[in-house]
């Protein structure tokens, strides 16, 4: 995937480029000044003034080099490198000419008393030699700054691409979470409408009316939340109570419920409707298939800084080849946990000795943001 950078996102910010230019030239000035002291040159003060003038000129010229290089920020790294090192040539010559003028042409007797101006003007090739020598040194200096700029620019571009890739990955994860969350509601609605249809067909109108009211309350509570946001465990348990009220109309004599969750665990955050497929499966494979009363229990506890939430039913033992339905239940929960928590979110399901089924969720403890 290719990312097109906006105009204002090209290269590095101008303030960063300016700081790098100032740092380079001030460091150069400090080194040259230290060298002049070590070598014991005469006229230190006049030379320092002229050196400062050349440094200012160098800063201005290097800023011009930056403006040239910046025009190639959208080009390939090869073209940017070629443009930088090519543009550094005339800039180096310009700085060299300025240096020759300041030090050798303008009042050279002030700092070089043994080198009169007449000799500098008369001696053929002397100026070109000095300018060429200084230009070569400044070219490597400017090339070093250009290489630093290219490195900064490339690193900034990589960071921008990484940020956009992270944003796209987050958007894809959010889309996956929405898809999985909305996958639950239609599935549940389909089963509930089938049950409602059965009640109407046998003329159990009061139970049908009660189921419609419970269904309305359930959807009013479940659809108000953002599918990307976690909810407190207390809210999730409340939704499951509403759902169990709906199913209690179908199985008034067989469905029993038990909720055993410590109060300090109720404020832990879980993905919205994460328990819905588990409770639904417990109804389908536990209560609906067993003629005797069946208890659906919801437990939760903290263990090793993790939240353990389980849904259990004590229905009859199911044969190994029993109908497992469409598979939307456990697979949906597993996918949602993986999308939300990665490897930290786990689901474990097993049959119980003597009958029944247990599904346990393991997820990180989160008490903020929901």
Image (cartoon, rainbow, N blue to C red):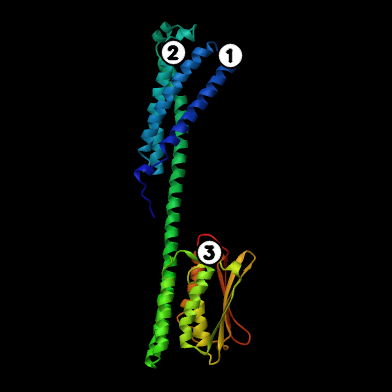
Which element is circle 2 on? helix
User: Can residue 321 be seen in the rendering of this structure?
Assistant: no
Nearer mark to the viewer, of 1 and 3: 3
The correct choice, above or below, for 192 with respect to 28 in the image is below
Identify the disc placed on residue 341: 3
Say left or right for 65 vs 282: left
The structure residue drawn at horizontal position 40% and vertical position 26%, both measured from the top left corner, is 60
The correct choice, above or below, for 94 with respect to 256 in the image is above
Quadrant in which residue 40 is drawn: top right
Instruction: Pick whichever of labels 1 and 3 is earlier in the sequence.
Output: 1
Quadrant in which residue 132 is drawn: top left
Label 1 – label 3 distance at C-alpha:
68 Å
The correct choice, above or below, for 61 with respect to 76 in the image is above
Q: Which residue is mark 2?
A: 104
Label 1 – label 2 distance at C-alpha:
19 Å
Nearer mark to the viewer, of 3 and 2: 3
The x, y position of residue 297, in whole percent, is 57, 79
The structure residue drawn at horizontal position 34% and vertical position 43%, both measured from the top left corner, is 7
Depth check, front residue: 319 or 71 = 319
Label 3 – label 2 distance at C-alpha:
71 Å
Which element is circle 3 on? helix
Q: Which residue is mark 1?
A: 40
Depth check, front residue: 332 or 162 = 332
């Amino acid at each position: 995937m290719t990312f097109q950078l906006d105009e204002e996102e090209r290269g590095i910010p101008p303030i960063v480029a300016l700081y790098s230019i100032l740092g380079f030239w001030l460091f150069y000035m400090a080194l040259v000044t230290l060298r002049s002291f070590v070598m014991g040159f005469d006229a230190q003060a006049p030379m320092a003034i002229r050196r400062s003038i050349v440094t200012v000129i160098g800063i201005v010229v290097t800023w011009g080099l930056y403006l040239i290089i910046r025009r190639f920020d959208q080009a390939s790294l090869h073209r940017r490198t070629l443009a930088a090192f090519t543009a550094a040539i005339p800039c180096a010559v310009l700085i060299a000419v300025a240096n020759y003028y300041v030090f050798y042409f303008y009042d050279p007797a002030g700092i070089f008393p043994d080198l009169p101006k007449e000799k500098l003007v008369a001696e053929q090739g002397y100026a070109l030699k000095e300018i060429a020598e200084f230009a070569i040194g400044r070219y490597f200096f400017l090339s070093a700054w250009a290489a630093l700029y290219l490195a900064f620019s490339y690193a900034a571009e990589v960071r921008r691409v990484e940020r956009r890739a992270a944003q796209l990955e987050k958007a894809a994860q959010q889309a996956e979470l929405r898809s999985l969350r909305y996958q639950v509601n239609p599935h549940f609605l389909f089963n509930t409408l089938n049950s409602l249809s059965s009640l109407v067909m046998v003329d159990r109108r009061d139970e049908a009316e009660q189921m419609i009211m419970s269904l309305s309350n359930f959807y009013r509570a479940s659809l108000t939340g953002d599918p990307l946001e976690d909810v407190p465990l207390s809210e999730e348990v409340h939704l499951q109570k509403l759902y169990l009220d709906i199913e209690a109309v179908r199985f008034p004599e067989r469905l029993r419920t038990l909720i055993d969750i410590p109060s300090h665990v109720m404020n832990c955050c879980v993905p919205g409707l994460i328990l819905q497929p588990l409770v639904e499966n417990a109804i389908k494979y536990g209560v609906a298939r067993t003629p005797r009363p069946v208890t659906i229990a919801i437990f939760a506890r903290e263990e090793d800084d993790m939240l353990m939430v389980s849904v259990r039913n004590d229905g009859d033992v199911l044969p190994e080849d029993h109908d497992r339905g469409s598979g939307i239940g456990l697979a949906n929960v597993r996918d949602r946990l993986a999308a939300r928590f990665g490897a930290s979110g786990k689901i474990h399901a097993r049959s119980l000795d003597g009958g029944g089924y247990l599904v346990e969720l393991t997820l990180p403890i989160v008490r903020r943001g929901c």
